[in-house]
Image: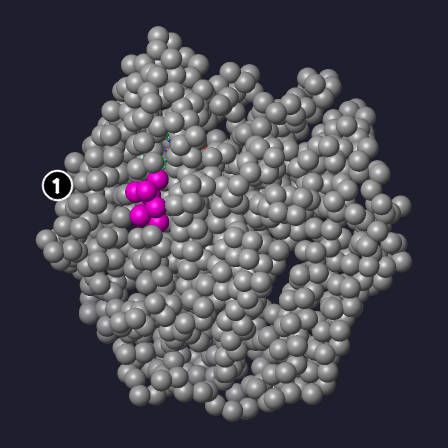
Amino acid sequence: MTDTTSDTTLDRINPAEHGGARKGEPSKSFEEIWDRPRGWRYWSSVSHRVVGKRFLVTGFCFFLIAGFLALLVRTQLIVPDNTFLDAETFNQVFTMHGTIMMFLFAIPMLEGFGVYLIPLMVGARDLVFPRLGAFGYYCYLYGGLMVLSSFLFDAAPDGGWFMYVPLSTSDFTPGLSADFWLIGITLAEIASVTAAVEIIASILCSRAPGMSLTRMPILMWYLLVTAFMIAIAFPPLIIGSILLESQRLLGLPFFDPALGGDPLLWQHLFWLFGHPEVYIIFLPAAGMVATMLPTFVGKPLFGYGFAVAAVVSMGFLSFGLWAHHMFTTGLPVMSLSLFSAASTMVAVPTGVQIFCFIATLAQGKPRLTVPMLFVLGFLFIFVLGGLTGVMLASVPFNFQAHDSYFVVAHLHYVLIGGFVFPMFGALYYWMPHLTGRMLSERIGKWVFWLMFAGFNLAFFMMHLTGLRGMPRRIATYPEGLGWDRLNLLSSIGAYILAAGVALFVWDFVRHFRQGLRAPLNPWGAGTLEWLYQPVTPGYNFRAIPEVRSREPLWDQPELSDRPAHDVAGALRACPDHRRETIGSDPVSGEPIQILRLPHPTWMPLISASGVALGFGATLASFYWLTVAGFATALAGITAWTREPSDSGVTRDTGLGGLRLAVNAVDRRGHLHVSIVGTMVISFALFASLLFGGLFLWNVQPEFADRVAEPVAAWTIAALCGGGVVAVFGWLALRTGARGALRAAALVDGVLVLAASTTGALMGSALWPVDPWASAFGATGWALGVFVTVHLAVIAWWALINALRKIVGAVEPGQTLPDLLLNAVCKATGAMVVITAICFLVVAS
Amino acid sequence: MIRMALHVARPVILWAIHFTAIYALISAACAPRALLEPDVARATAALVTLVTGVLMLVWLVIAGRVGGRLNPDEPSRTLAQAAWWTNVIMLIAIVANLWPIAVMGSCTG
Ligand code: HEM
C-alpha cells in the first residue's frame, strides 16, 4: 500500500508542516469517545447504530399503522354493500395506506438497514457523514408525523398514493389534504436523498484495507446501485411535488391544459420516480437475501459476477419502464410498445439474479431457520409477482386489467414478496446484532406460516376478483357480481396475515427479557458484522482488520481465532482522541486517508427542526414562520460545517508503518465523492425541469410558441456569467493550493460577486415572461429559479470560505472546501449555460 | 481494476443513451409538434442502434478476452465476468428498444 495522495497536484504542499491536529476529547478513553450519550443527550447521538435503529423502529411503526389501515379497507370490502366506512373515509384510508407503505415504511426501512449495516460490513467505525444521517432521520420523522397528523385535522389525503392531477389541484381538492401529502412527503424525502449520498460515499470511501470492489459483501453492490437510483429517481417526484404545490399555492399553471399545461406531465414525473421506486425497494431486499442465503447454505453466493451484472443492469433498465403505468392515457402506440419492450426486458436480469439464488440453494442443503423460511417465501411469492408483471407489460392485457384488482394483487405480490418477506427474514437474521438476543425460532415459524398462508389467501384471490372485473379503489360493490366470496376470502387472508405480524410484535417485545442471549456469530455467517459477540461495541472495530476475502470470517482464521478486541488492524492507537476511521480508494479499497468523524452534536436536530418548521409553516400559510424556519436551518447547517479543520495532518495508521493524511485533499476522498453524488442529484432535478419544458413544448406547441421571449442580451450575459463562475471556482482552488490565502480569499470574493450577478442576470432575462400566463413560461421561470438557488449557495459558500481564510481558520494546503466548491461551480456553471442556451433557442 | 469497473459501467450507460435517443425520436415524430416524419425517425433509430450495437459487440468481445486472460483468483476477473454479462443483457435490450419503431408503420400502430 502506498500513500496515494502524493500524486495529485493539490498536494505539492505538505499540510503536516503547518501545525498539529487539534485534540478531540483528551480526558476520555477510546471506549468513552465512542460511547452513546446518555439521558436526554441521547437525541444528540449521530452514531450510525443509533440512527439506523431509529429508522428501523420508526419505519416498522409506520408499517403497523399502514397495515391497520389495510385491515380497515379489507373490513369494508368483506361483504357487499357494506357501510362500515363511508366513501370519503375509504378514499382517505386507502390513500394513506399506500402512501405510508411506500414512503414512510419501505424506503426508510431499507435506509435503516443500510445505515446500520454498511459500516459494520465494510469494516468502518461509522458512516462517513453521521450528522447527515441524523439530519435525514429527523426530516423523515417530522415529514411522517406531518402526513399522519392530517387525520387529526380531518384533512387526510384522498387522491390515491400517486396524487394524479387534475384531481389533486385546488379546483377538485380544495382544503389542505393534498398539501399535507405534497409538503409532508417532500420533507420525508429529504431523508432519502441524504441517505443516497451517505450510502454512496460510505460504501465507496470507507472500506477496510484490502476490500476491493470485488471483495465487498454482495449487499453493498445492491445498496450502491439503489443509492444511485434514489439519487436519480427521487428528483422527478420532488420537482413534480414542488410544481404541483406551486400550482395550488401560487396559481402557476404547470398542469392546467387551458394555459398550455398538461396533466400527463405529472404522471410522467411521478412514474419516472414511481417505477424505479419499486426496484429501489426490491433491490436492497434482494441483497439481504443474497447475504442470508450463503450463510444458511454454507457456501458462497453462486455467480457473484452475474449478480453484479444483474443488479447494475436492473438499476438502469428500471428507468426505461415508467410509462407502462400510463398505457391507458392515450400515448402514441409506438411509445407504448417501446415501454412494453423495455418492461419485458427487465425480466432478463431479474431472471439472472433469481438463477444465482436458486443455484446457491442447489449447492448445499439449506438449514431451514426462520430467516431462511422467509427467503424461500420471498422466492416463491416474488417469482409469481414477476410473472403477473410480465403479463401486465403486454399492452392489450394491460388495457383489460388496468385499474382492476388484478393490479392490486400484482403490486402486493411484488412488494410484499419482494420486500416484506425478505425484511422479516432480515429482522430475524440481524436481530441478535440489534438487541443481543435471539427471537424465538418456534414462534418465528408460526409467524412465517401465518404470514405466508394469509398473504396468499388474501392476494391470490384478488387476481381472480380483478379478472372478474372488480375495479380498485371502490368503497363497496353490489351483491351478485361474482365478487362476494372472493372478497370474503381476501379479507380473511388479510386478518391471518395480520395475526402473523401481531405474533411477531409479541415475540419482539417478549425477546427483550426471555430471548436467548445471542452467541458469537449465531448463524455462522462469513461477513464482517459478526466479528464481535453481540452486541458489538459502539466503535464497531477496535482495530480495522485487513480483508482478503468476500467471506472474511470463513476464510481468514486470524479474525476468529482470538477475541475480536485483539484482532490486528488499522487505527488501534487514538492519539488525537477523536472518532476516526480509514478512508479508502473507491475501487481498490487501499487506504488513502484517515477520516475524522463528528462527535455527538445537536446541529442535525436543530437544522431538521428548522426545515420542518419551514415546511409546516408553509402548509399553515404562516409565511414569516417559514422564513424563520429556513433561517434556523441555514444557521444550523452553517454551524455544523464550521469545524476546525485538521485536513492534511499525517498520522501512523498502524498498518506496517503506513502514515496517512487526515481528511486528505483528494478527488477520491469521501467529501469529493459525496459532492459528485450531490451534483448527480442536482442534475437529475435540473433534467426533470428540462424534461417538463421540452414535454410542454412538444405537446402544446401553440401555447409554447406564444410565450414572450426571454431577453437575448441578458441571457447571453448570464451564459457568460455561468462560465465565469466555473472559472473562478477553479481559480480559488488553484490560488488556495499555492498557499496564497489572502489572494484566494480575494478570488472567493469575486466568486461571490460573479454568482450573485449571474443570478440577477438570469432574472433580468426572464423578466418579460409572465409565469402565470402559460405553463411553458412558468417552467422557464422554474429553471431560472433553480439555477439561481445554486448560485446563491455558491455565493454563501464562497463568502464563508473567504471569511475563514481572512480570520486565519485555514492553514496553507487545507484546500478541501475549495476543492468541493470548485466541483459545485463547474456543475452549476454547466447548468447555467444549458439553461441560457434553452432560453436563446426559445428566443430565436 | 478501475478499467474493469468502467467496462461494467459503459454498456449500461450506452443503453441509457440509446433508450433516451429512441424515446426522443418517437416523441419527435408522434407528438403534436410533429418535428420529424416517422420514416426519418425510423431511419435515425436504425442508424443509432447500428452504431450502438457494433460498439457493444466490440466491448463484449473485449470483456470476454480480458476475462479469459485473467487468472481465476484475480479480483478483476469477477468484474470482467460482470462486464461480459452486462454487455449481453444490454445488447438484447437495445434490440428491444429498436423493435417498436422498426416494425410499426405509424405512430398509431
Ligand atoms: C400487510 C398487508 C397488506 C394488505 C392487507 C394490503 C391491502 C391493500 C388493499 C386491499 C389495497 C387496495 C385498496 C383499493 O384499491 O381499494 C391496497 C392498496 C395498496 N397497497 Fe396494500 N396491503 C398490504 C401491504 C402493503 C405493502 C407492504 C405495501 C408497500 C410496500 C402496499 C402498498 C399498497 C399500495 C401502493 C396500494 C395502492 C393505493 C392506492 O390505490 O392509492 N400494501 N393494499
Left or right: where does residue A419 sit relative to residue A389? left
A60 within the magenta span? yes
Circle 1 packing at 10 Å, graded few (<14), some (14-19), many (20+), is few
Q: Where is residue A695 in the image (x, y as percent from the top left)?
A: 71, 37
Magenta stretch secondary structure, dominant:
helix
Q: Position of residue A562 (x, y in %)?
A: 20, 69
Left or right: where does residue A765 sit relative to residue A778? right
Is B80 situated above or below A415? below
Q: Where is residue A288 in the image (x, y as percent from the top left)?
A: 34, 46
Q: Write the residue at 89% across / 46% down.
A: A844
Looking at the rendered structure, the secondary structure element under dot 1 is helix
- Write down the residue under mark 1: A442
Q: Position of residue A19 (x, y in %)?
A: 51, 91
Which stretch appears magenta?
A: A59-66
- Say which of A731 and A756 sits in front: A756
Is A147 situated above or below A456? below
Is A798 situated above or below A21? above
The quarter of the picture where residue A595 lies is bottom left
- Say which of A356 and A175 sits in front: A175
Q: Which amino acid does label 1 sit on?
A: Arg
Q: Write the residue at 47% across / 39% down.
A: A157
Please tell me in which quarter of the rendered image ligand 1 is found.
top left
Whether residue A297 is visible, yes or no, is no
Q: Write the residue at 19% across / 49% down.
A: A508
Q: Write the residue at 61% across / 59% down.
A: A679
The quarter of the picture where residue A504 lies is top left
Q: Which chain carries label 1?
A: A
